Image (cartoon, rainbow, N blue to C red):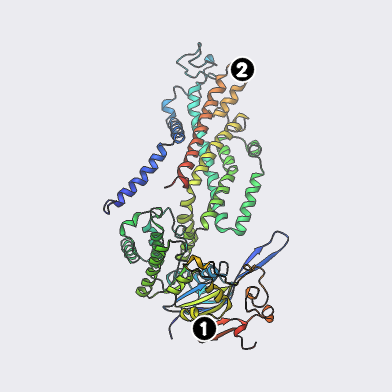
Amino acid sequence: MAELMIDAKDVTRNFTISRGMFRGKQQLKAVNGVDLTVERGEVLALVGESGCGKTTLAKVLLGLLPQTSGTVELCGQPINDVPRLALARTIQPIFQDPYSSLNPRKTIGSIIALPMKVQGIADQDSMRRRVEETMDLVGLPPRLYDAFPNQLSGGQRQRVAIARALVNRPQIVVCDEPTSALDVSVQSQILNLLNDLRNELNLTYIIISHNLAVVEHIATRVAVMYLGRIVEIADTDTLFKDPQHPYTRALLDSVLTPDPNMGIPNNQLGASYPNPIDPPTGCSFHPRCVNAMPHCATVAPNGKADGGHYVECHLYDDAS
Amino acid sequence: MSEINGKTLESQTKSSVFRRRVFGHQGVMIGAAIVLAAVLIALSAPLIAPHDPYYQDLLNRLVPPVWDSRGSWEHILGTDHLGRDYLSRLIYGARISLLIGVGAALISGLIGTVLGVAAGYFGGRVDMVVTFMITVRLSMPVVLVALAVVAIVGGSLQVVIMVLGFLLWDRFAVVMRSSTLQIRSMDYVAAAQAVGCSTTRILTTEIMPNVVNNLIVIATLEIAHAIILEAALSFLGLGVQPPLPSWGLMVSEGKDMMLFEPWLITIPGVALFLLVLAINLLGDGARDITAPENRN
């Protein structure tokens, strides 16, 4: 049995929404009771449409947002008890937009050196050596050490962001849409780089994406999120071959084909995304579900795990 | 670009682009020249002033400037109603104006930046309190409050600097708050948090360097604002007290003789106008030069 890197149990994160002075406040459940485990060396992809809570979940795992309830254990330790610097050594983020993730006033060298400076573990010389080593690792030429971010291309910037995340050799890297802001030609370079680094440094990835091609290419396991809940988790092969949850099927159907004559796929989802402040009763997916049954609107489905394949839908409930 | 020269070439172009932008901007050049001249004159006042600005020569009262037929080279800009050399008073007055402008801008800049950055960065309750303070401050008319305070405490150079410093921070706070809000949402701030940076470190190394150009622009505008307000307070007799040679005070002392000896008002008036215009040109230019749309 592989070592558990992340063990999240029933994680909930609420945001308080003020609806004006006299109308009181409301809770938005961005992440609503998520159970998630990630083993060492795994690449877990979180997929789902915009606003389903992927990024919030990632921020909770990174310790940037405290969870409202539930527990997150990082390498067996509750995340709230881990000191800030130790947490930073274990888990690091890579952000979506390389144009906003690098401070325009700092040189590439000092951006990559920041995590080491904060940890206070190295002197100037060894820091510079380590930065150049890491730049080499991610494929950045050493002459960029004194350059500023605005002198770099999008792909190079993303490499800088990866170098900053990896310079202290963390064990887990959370990539929030690592390629969606890049050109298609650069996307594959970055994905291959992430893959190589994973083998080289024995990293564990959590990758957030809504690009299913990326997910199929890089992930070992996929978790599908809908309205703050994980509705299906399975190995990548299983999920793409045998999607069970109607929402997963709709997601897979929505992938565009390179042939323009095929038209835009009809994913049968119809109605727009529900308001997360006021989620539907019962199964939160029922208003858009093609397989909806009468009791879907009233009873929330229980999850059913079959080996590594977890699905949360009344179609697979034993009780129904 | 060759690999070996890559670094020096890049840094050269960066600084030369900046230099070209500064020297190509007429407003900045004119403003900088006048401000620099005023600062030099103020610093070297004892060396270049032809007379003691406080020396009264009652036999030579109201001598007109040299371009008047009754003027003489002894008093290039003439003398005032107590026979004091007007040029010397003007030169020493530059010290007062710049001191008050810079002093008030420093105090208000400190208050406004701390409040604005705190509001923008922490948000929530802090933001609510700061926004309320800004609203309260904006609802107080500056001149009226300054008049009341000076009338109670008594006018002096220090009091004027303090009063203006504590009254002019609103624009600093508003601008710093909004630019901090904007920078705070950037991913590099989140990255710094994830890396384990302390809040102080994030504020000083991630936020401040990215908002400091706005700060400089506001500071120049507020220096000009403070100089004008000082002149206004001194004109009303509630600012710098005689016999200190403030430009506003010189206008005030000359106003009784305005119809017959108009230079008593026009000379310090033109000096004030030029200095404030120059500082505003400089601030405007600083904004143009550092504006992101101008960046390659």
User: Residue B248, image x and y in percent?
Assistant: 57, 29
Assign the C terminus of chain A to one quadrant of the image. bottom right
Residue extending farthest to the front is A261
Q: Measured from the top left, where is residue B151 in percent x and y?
A: 65, 36
The picture places residue B187, in percent across and down from the top left corner, at 48, 60
Residue pointed to by mark 2: B259
Between A291 and B113, the one lying in front of the other is A291
> Label 2 is placed on what type of residue?
Leu
Task: Give the Cα separation between the discs numbered 1 and 2.
Answer: 96 Å
Amino acid type, mark 1 = His
Alpha-carbon neighbours of circle 1 within 10 Å: few (<14), some, or many (≥20)? some
Q: Chain of mark 1?
A: A
Q: What label does residue A35 carry, if any?
A: none
- Residue B81 visible: no
Residue at (67, 73) in percent of width and height: A280
Chain under disc 2: B
Q: Quick one: quadrant of the N terminus of chain A?
A: bottom left
Side of B59 where A168 appears, left or right: left
Hey, which residue is sitting farthest right in the picture? A22
Q: The residue tagged with tag 1: helix, strand or loop?
A: strand
Asked if residue B70 shows in the view, the reply is yes
Residue under label 1: A309
- Residue at far bottom of view: A318
| Count of number-bearing discs | 2
Query: In front here: A116 or A98?
Result: A98
The residue nearer to you, when weighing A308 against B204, is A308
> Image point 65% across, 48% down: which residue?
B135
